[in-house]
Image (tube, rainbow, N blue to C red):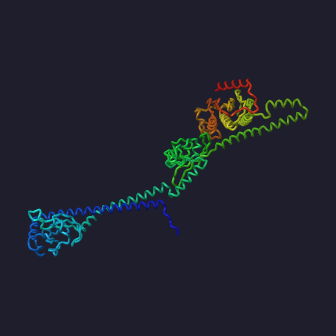
Amino acid sequence: MPKLALRFSTQTLLLQLGVVLLVVLLSGTVHAWLVYGRIGTEAENQALTLARTVASDPVIRSQVETISKGPGTPPATVLAAGPIQAAAEAARSRTGALFVVVTDETGLRLAHPDQARLGERVSTDPSDALSGKEVTTRNTGTLGPSAGAKVPVYAPGSTATVVGEISVGYSMETLGQSLAEDIVPIALTAAGSLVAGVLASFLLRRRLQRLTLGLEPEEISTLVHDQVAVLQGVDDGVIGISADGRITVFNAAATRLLGMPEASGAPGSPATAGATDGHVLTGTDWERAAVPAQLKALTQPSAHDAEAVEIVAGGRVLVANARKALHRKEDLGWVVMLRDRTELQQLTRQLDAVGTMSAALRAQRHEFANQLHTIAGFMSIGQHGQAKDYLAKISATGPLKFPVQQAELLQDPYLQAFVGAKSVEADERGVALRIGPETLVREHVTEPQDVTTVLGNLIDNAVNAAVAGSSTQRWVELELLDEPGPDGGTLHIVVADSGDGLGGVEPERVFVEGFTTAEPAEGRIGSAGGQGLGLALVRQLARRRGGDVRVLEPGSPGGPGAVFMATMPKVTGAPDDAPAAEPSLAAERSAAAERKEGHQ
């Protein structure tokens, strides 16, 4: 069977427990050894003090001197009943010593706890004490191991003549009992330290598992590599917000889509530490981050998970949605996804323009067929003069009749077709679309997609405002003026309507993404698709080209309504086969421009 490998957190726990146990054992052992040495030293000092006391007793000194000067040593029975034995035993009983032994100058016992050993030579070497030195010892004698001291006994009235020695000892077993009494606090301290270490190890293991989400180091390493590969390899923007409201992930795609600057620090520098992509927002508070407010609203507690919204940021139309990040029922925060729909929006606008013109063409198909049938009828009955007059009339008004006045002021066929198609849509809603007398466009549109986006949004907004207005006469007036330039002409667009104006709304607010007429208090200005993106999109589009979109007049209740002006540089140019402009045409352009400035 394959050997089961322990998890990293379990290995860490066992290692910590082993270290704690080893430290506690070593600390306890050293502490016990130090206490044992201290107790032994205290016993030696106590024995030395007792030995000095006994050696200074006048009775002991005189009796030892008498025996030392006499011939031989008295019998054990005489020594047992003598004053030396009595004084030594009294001192031993009083102090709890193991023994108090008195010898003569040759080392023969004159006093001993075991009377049978009186008159015998001591079992340990008495030469140091008999030479006049005081010594402390730890040795094993006839009564067992002991810690004691030996001091000389001087003759009465002398400090130089040694007549014997005193040996005092305390049992090592007694020292062991004292150590056992002192070791209890040591053991309790060691046990408490061990319990605290074990508890700390378990808490550290639990925190480690929570921080790593139960992943092994190999899994974490693989996860980091996969995260970097995925976040840097996708075109969608990814923003990660932790449960405590900090930005943990902000990939390069999100930086690009939101039009934000990237961090310039090198990897590993303070500016990029902790980030997978080095963005300067990583690690900052989400609520204070410099991102659109719509993104922050997606992560509010009241927000619905996976609810997508459209925003305009960095000159792009983005679709954003947020999802809760969960791991084994643990809340990890939010993940915000950003997808670029700018190209799709542009294609949609272009298709809308084509569809609008196609619908207008289909709407006029029957009228065109009737005109052909009329001409064919005149020819078949021989009324050639009437046919000629009818053809002249058609040539003057155009084969297709759009409900827009002064369309001939728009020389560009694309603008004619687009504005004509928009007039058909407006007419179906009961709004008259007209071209103002200040209009003068002689060059051709070179950027029809951008012009369609801006012009279409402004016309749609104006039509919506006219329909929602309180005036009985619903109209939208459009004025266009092209201004030639060396790198392309600038197209000026002014759109007015018969609505009720902005209704007290700040002019700049209508250009904020999310502003929509769906709100009752703000129902004066339309927006593309009802999503509050139309005016914000066209302003950013115009500014990206070096132009702008602004409010000339806020309007008033009952009409006339608001007046918007768009300036789009480098969107027009002279056709390849166009002749040079005549002086009269240049003068006409200058006069129109002066009238336009006066109107503004």
Identify the residue at image location x=85%, y=35%. Answer: 374
Asked whether the viewer can see residue 287, the reply is yes
- Residue 181, image x and y in percent? 27, 64
User: Quarter-wise, where is residue 32 in the image?
Assistant: bottom left
User: Quarter-wise, where is residue 350 in the image?
Assistant: top right
Is 256 in front, or is 519?
256
Is 359 in front, or is 76?
76
Identify the residue at image location x=69%, y=38%. Answer: 449
In this view, 321 is above or below 449: below
- Residue 591, image x and y in percent? 69, 24
User: Quarter-wise, where is residue 87 in the image?
Assistant: bottom left
- Residue 455, image x and y in percent? 68, 35
Asked whether the viewer can see residue 245, the reply is no
Is 436 in front, or is 544?
544
- How many dots with numbers? 0
In this view, 329 is above or below 261: below
Quadrant placement of the C terminus? top right
